[in-house]
Image: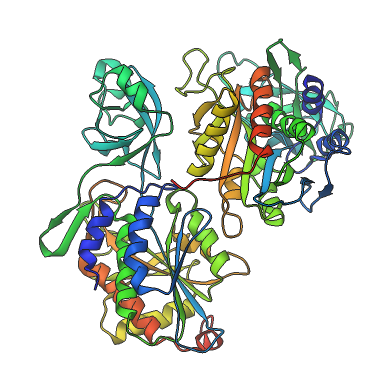
């Protein structure tokens, strides 16, 4: 039995920036291995894992997509031993100065992000947050050592270890979206001894933060009847309280909008209500910004849903989620799949 | 190869209207490919070789289209208003000359005729083709134009409009000429509509269904006075792209390209481009996904009517491409 919290903590400590998901993928694969029947790595690095259903063939398929790639940085220049860098995924530069990082060079190098002295900045910049292009990384090495070890294109990861706070709150980097990978893992655990009719494809997608790459390609290979994107959403917190936000630790969100099939939404909502799993309606007026955005329009179109896990301080090294919400997302998915009838698609209505 | 580049850059081929360029390419690759076709978007797809033991199906892509303008309105006095077809920067407009697909040429003026040191917005500019009124104007709404500027051979350095990406097209043609035996099934794609969202490559990649994709395109440099920082220099060799703002190259492809260049003694640079992308972005997410990489030709003044490349970088790009494609391709895991 996987300890989901321990698995998440291990996963958070592993690198795996977009397009370089290897270390995260290997850990997920070894955890999922006893829970699934087969696994493949896609041409762009997503992990596709199949847990076969118990219905007669051909079985309908449901795809659960949680992206495993993390945001981070990449070296763009080496000048006198100091590194300039750009972002992978979206990073708020206000949070960067003072952070510890790991530069994945010829060997892993510890470093810190530093801000130049005011005198080195254009005058109008000196009293505002410093843009990324002026920041640099100091490795404490000589210029010669740095030039020998570091190259343009080397990756930079956040080095903060995850931390557990009271009430099952976890904080750390990459909780977007490894919290959802943990939720899918919890779902697989719960389904372990369940005779579900459908084939379940658990997918840890690659490159979501850059191109939704896994979202575009995994459904093409798998051709599911239903696809769910599990991703983090905004939790209420300081300065975040409007309709786009949801209380931390008080339930998951179900997306409503163009990326979500209303009949699919209704069916999952009914399961949540029946089991007293708290869910919030998340309005997605323009698009979900998740793998569902891509998955929905793959091949001849796919019936999609979005489940959100509330998270504070998104795209920072101090993201925060509640373990409870991760467990709820997993439990909701497993409960839905366990009761999913073979003829679900035949009876699925667009609306009523 | 300079003659080929010259004829390519002098052709008119705004995104969506690449016919002139396509015909030039068709002529220059006659007899070199095993199969040539044109798809519904106008991509020219030339196959060379048939898959052999240990080979791969590879898509190579260089785009034929160039940035340009489209006429939106002709006023009573025969002045033409326009908008951009692709990434045209307003700073390059005033004083530029343009040529429409029907051959009509004109000059760009701005509403204020007293501008000294600021660039007018695009909607404050117009094209003057010398017409006296609307009826006498040989241009209609919807007509496409490109910039004109004489091709300049400075010896090591070449200057022209549309080197983005006709220089990539020329490299593909030359590589097709030089490639002898290959275990790989190679699809040379001369793509359309790159400048309006890497669109031709979407359908070409779907049709080719490659196991590996490589785009050939220009990239920016950081070697001009007080420019934005970028570690790419004209004349230091083609680049192996690690990342641009549209995608991340597959790390296995990056490693393979670097190893091949090092083994063959071809100079190369590593590239991280912070604004711009290439056909590889589209190829990567095709079907079940494709490992991709990019060879870029360093280019100053990208998207101006006077782009500049280094001829040795062009020659070395051909060498690198031929070295990459002549052998069995092995992508090692991270």
Residue A252, relative to residue B319: is it above or below? below
Asked where in the image residue B75 lies, by quadrant, the reply is: top right
Asked where in the image residue A328 lies, by quadrant, the reply is: bottom left
Asked where in the image residue A154 lies, by quadrant, the reply is: top left
The foreground one among A1 and A71 is: A1
x, y percent for residue A61: 50, 77
Residue at the front extreme, as displayed: B53
Q: Residue at x 35, y 84 (%)?
A: A271
Q: How many marks?
A: 0
Residue B70 visible in this rendered orientation of the protein: yes
x, y percent for residue A284: 42, 63
x, y percent for residue A120: 29, 16
Residue at the top extreme, as displayed: B155
Relative placement, left or right, of B261 versus A118 is right
Relative placement, left or right, of A182 versus B192 is left
x, y percent for residue A242: 29, 59
The foreground one among B186 and B12 is: B186
The foreground one among B276 and B72 is: B276
Q: Residue at x 40, y 45 (%)?
A: A89
Residue at the left extreme, as displayed: A166
Residue A77, relative to residue B183: is it above or below? above
In the rendered image, the quadrant that contains the C terminus of chain B is top left
């Amino acid at each position: 039995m996987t300890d989901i919290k321990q698995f998440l903590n291990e996963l958070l400590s592993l690198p795996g920036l977009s397009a370089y998901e290897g270390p995260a993928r290997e850990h997920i694969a070894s955890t999922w291995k006893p829970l699934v029947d087969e696994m493949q790595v896609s041409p762009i690095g997503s992990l596709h894992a199949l847990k076969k259903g118990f219905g007669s063939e051909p079985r309908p398929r449901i795809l659960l997509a949680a992206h495993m790639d993390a945001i981070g940085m990449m070296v763009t220049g080496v000048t006198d031993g100091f590194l300039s860098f750009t972002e992978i995924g979206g990073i708020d530069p206000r949070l960067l100065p003072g952070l510890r990082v790991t530069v994945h060079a010829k060997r892993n190098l510890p470093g810190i992000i530093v801000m130049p002295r005011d005198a080195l900045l254009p005058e109008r910049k000196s009293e505002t947050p410093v843009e990324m292009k002026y920041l640099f990384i100091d490795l404490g090495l000589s210029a010669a050592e740095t030039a020998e070890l570091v190259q343009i294109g080397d990756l930079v990861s956040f080095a903060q270890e995850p931390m557990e706070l009271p009430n099952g709150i976890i904080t750390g980097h990459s909780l977007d979206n490894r919290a959802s990978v943990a939720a899918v893992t919890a779902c697989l655990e719960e389904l372990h001894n369940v005779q579900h009719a459908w084939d379940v494809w658990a997918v840890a997608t690659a490159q979501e933060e850059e191109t939704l790459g896994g979202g575009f390609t995994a459904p093409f290979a798998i051709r599911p009847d239903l696809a769910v994107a599990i991703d983090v959403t905004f939790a209420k917190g300081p300065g975040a309280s409007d309709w786009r936000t949801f209380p931390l630790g008080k339930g998951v969100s179900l997306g409503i909008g163009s990326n979500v099939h209303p009949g699919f939404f209704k069916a999952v909502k009914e399961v949540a209500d029946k089991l007293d799993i708290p869910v919030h309606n998340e309005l997605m007026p323009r698009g979900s910004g998740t793998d569902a955005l891509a998955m929905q329009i793959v091949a001849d179109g796919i019936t999609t849903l979005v489940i959100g896990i509330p998270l504070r301080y998104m795209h920072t090294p101090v993201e925060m989620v509640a373990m409870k919400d991760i467990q709820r997302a997993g439990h909701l998915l497993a409960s839905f799949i366990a009761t999913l009838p073979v003829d679900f698609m035949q009876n699925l209505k667009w609306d009523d | 190869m300079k003659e080929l580049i010259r004829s390519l850059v002098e052709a008119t081929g705004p995104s969506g209207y690449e016919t002139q360029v396509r015909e030039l390419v068709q002529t220059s690759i006659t007899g070199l490919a095993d199969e040539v076709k044109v798809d519904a978007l106008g991509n020219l797809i030339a196959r060379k070789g048939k898959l052999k033991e240990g080979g791969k199906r590879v898509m190579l892509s260089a785009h034929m289209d160039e940035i340009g303008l489209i006429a939106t309105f002709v006023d009573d006095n025969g002045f033409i208003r326009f908008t951009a077809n692709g990434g045209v920067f307003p700073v390059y407009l005033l004083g530029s000359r343009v040529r429409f697909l029907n051959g009509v040429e004109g000059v760009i003026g701005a509403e204020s005729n007293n501008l000294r040191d600021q660039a007018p917005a695009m909607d404050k500019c117009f094209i003057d083709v010398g017409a006296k009124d609307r009826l006498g104007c040989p241009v209609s709404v919807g007509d496409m134009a490109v910039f004109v500027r004489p091709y300049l051979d400075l010896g090591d350095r070449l200057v022209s409009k549309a080197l983005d990406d006709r220089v990539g097209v020329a490299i593909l043609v030359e590589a097709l000429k030089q490639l002898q035996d290959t275990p790989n099934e190679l699809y040379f794609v001369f793509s359309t509509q790159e400048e309006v969202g890497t669109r031709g490559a979407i359908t070409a990649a779907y049709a080719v269904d490659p196991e590996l994709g490589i785009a050939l395109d220009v990239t920016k440099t950081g070697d001009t006075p007080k420019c934005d920082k970028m570690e790419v220099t004209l004349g230091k060799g083609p680049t192996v792209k690690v990342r641009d703002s549209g995608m991340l190259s597959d790390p296995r492809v990056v490693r393979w390209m670097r190893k091949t260049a090092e083994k063959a003694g071809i100079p190369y640079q590593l590239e991280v481009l912070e604004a711009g992308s290439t056909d590889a972005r589209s190829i990567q997410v095709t079907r079940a996904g494709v490992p991709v990489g990019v060879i870029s030709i360093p280019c100053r003044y990208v998207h101006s009517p006077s782009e500049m490349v280094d001829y040795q970088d062009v020659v070395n790009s051909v060498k690198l491409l031929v070295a990459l494609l002549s052998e069995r391709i092995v992508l090692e895991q991270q």
